[in-house]
Image: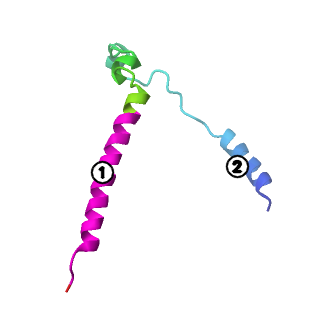
Amino acid sequence: MKPLPLLVLLLTCAACADFPELEGREQPNVRSAAYPKLIPVQDILGPPIDPVNEAAEIEEDLTTRSEALAKKAEALQNAQTN
């Protein structure tokens, strides 16, 4: 069987399903509850980051780590083994 007729059959069956009405099902205390205070996204995220400065800091950190790893690799290559 080809997938398209099967998909049409499944969608047709799904369209015939009864979905319960949700209106009036919430508790009375939920209807009268206060909404939470909404705050702007900018306040949550904080000040914007300067990509140039951040890139320079990351580059400096990576360079330092690279040099440390190179020294460690050189020390391991020069180590005497029995």
Quarter location, residue 46: top left
Going 30% across and 58% down the picture, which residue do you hit? 69
Above or below 12: residue 37: above
Q: Is residue 55 left or right of residue 8?
A: left
Q: Position of residue 73 (x, y in %)?
A: 29, 65
Q: Position of residue 26 (x, y in %)?
A: 40, 23
Q: Is-magenta flag for residue 65?
A: yes
Going 26% across and 63% down the picture, which residue do you hit? 72
Residue 59 versus residue 8: which sits nearer the camera?
59
Q: Is-magenta flag for residue 29?
A: no
Where does label 2 land, which residue? 10
Badge number at residue 65? 1
Q: Assign the C terminus to one quadrant of the image.
A: bottom left
Amino acid at dot 1: Arg
Report how many numbered discs are placed on residues in the image: 2
Q: Outermost residue, front direction?
A: 78
Amino acid at dot 2: Leu
Badge number at residue 78? none
Magenta-highlighted residues: 55-81
Going 61% across and 37% down the picture, which residue do you hit? 18
